Amino acid sequence: MKPLIDLIRTKSSQRVPIWFMRQAGRYLPEYRALRAQQPDFLKFCYTPKLAVEATLQPLKRYDLDAAILFSDILVIPHALGQHVGFEEGVGPILGDFHLKNLKIDRLEQTLSPVFEILTTLRACLPPHISLIGFSGAPWTLYCYMIEGRGKRGFSKAIAWGQENPQQFREVMELLTDAVVAYLKHQVRAGAEVVQLFDTWAGEAPQDLYEIGVVKPVTKIVKELKAFSAQVPLMGFPKNIGERIVPYVKETGIDVLSLDPTFNPEALAQILPQTVYQGGLDPELVVLGGEAMIKKADTYLKAFKNRPYIFNLGHGLLPKTPPENVQKLIDHVRKMNVDG
Ligand code: 1CP
């Protein structure tokens, strides 16, 4: 009935469901047109009519098994009271970080449009499509909150955590509570599975890793399971290398989203109980052609007799030709039929 959720629950390997991280967004001309209606990106995310439409756009084009809520991970710092802006060509820019100014009590109200978006989506999606909610994981949110922006290295976030161990614990606890509250509301509103994006997990030095990455994610999984045992959790701890095995065992996540650095053949042997997802380098979908198909096949073959969800090792890039996405989907569907 719902290929994605059924696969996670039954751990079946019969059919490979497919969705993409950042399946909505700037590589689609229809998204760029919709986005032109609201230049302020946060306002766009908080306008149900626009965010619902952005979520549905890739499903109108492609045969996918899931819709992922259109939003951004940085709505949490915003809901806690930190200034968050998005600048064209630059990305997110956050205001100064002051722990004492962050408050969790307005989170539900500030993020209420997100819950409305999920409820609307759940009501209009066809029954075979699973609705994915998401949140940034605490460590990745912390990195943006301290650095004030993304991608350019995290030396400030690392130094702050090492120099202020007590406050670091406090921020992590606050962010963990915020993510738990946020995801519970998402589930109440209609999310059927949730993904934790920990894009910068690999940047965490060993002395911050347990408190910054493993402990928060473990608590989030535990609290969400206690709230609703039915809702699977997907984890995307990008670039954590050999820390992957203890991560899966300790956190208890149901689905492991792979980044391109993992060797799928080796991993399939090491963690045979885990449901795997993704892995293909998004640059290969920009390239298309034989290179894309050949690499997609290595994942499909490595996980042939395991529960596997097709996806990428990171989000679709803005320069991706939409026709390459179509070709990739056609290929995965064909492999399902041909074996
Ligand atoms: O101009 C625009 O239209 C804004 C570009 C954009 C979009 C389309 C941003 C700003 N965020 C999003 C949507 C988004 N972000 C989604 C929903 C789309 C979908 O999946 O279909 C999701 C799940 C995210 C999650 C997100 N935001 C992550 C985690 C996943 C990942 O890609 O690593 C991260 C790190 C962010 C931060 C962020 N938001 C936007 C940008 C450009 C960035 C990256 C900033 C950086 O570090 O350089």
Image: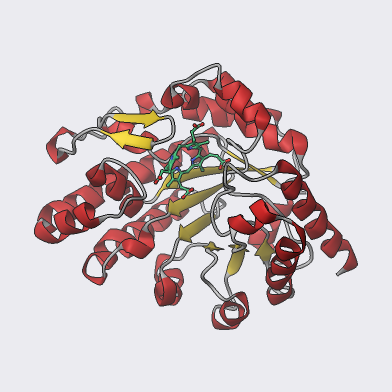
Q: Residue furthest right?
A: 338
Rendered image coloring scheme: secondary structure
Can residue 247 be seen here?
A: yes
On the image, the x and y values in percent for residue 318 come to 57, 41
On the image, the x and y values in percent for residue 91 come to 40, 37
Q: Nearer the viewer, residue 15 or 293?
A: 293
At x 25%, y 32%, the residue is 82
Q: Nearer the viewer, residue 244 or 287?
A: 287
Q: Is residue 307 above or below residue 20?
A: below
In this picture, residue 130 sits left or right of residue 233:
right
Res. 260 image quadrant: bottom right
At x 43%, y 34%, the residue is 89
Can residue 122 be seen here?
A: no
How many marks on residues?
Answer: 0
On the image, the x and y values in percent for residue 335 come to 83, 64
Res. 278 image quadrant: bottom right
At x 22%, y 53%, the residue is 157
Q: Nearer the viewer, residue 208 or 292?
A: 292
In this picture, residue 264 sits left or right of residue 41:
right
Q: Pick the quarter of the image with the C terminus.
A: bottom right
In this picture, residue 236 sits left or right of residue 17:
left
On the image, the x and y values in percent for residue 168 come to 17, 54
At x 56%, y 37%, the residue is 69
Q: Residue furthest top?
A: 37
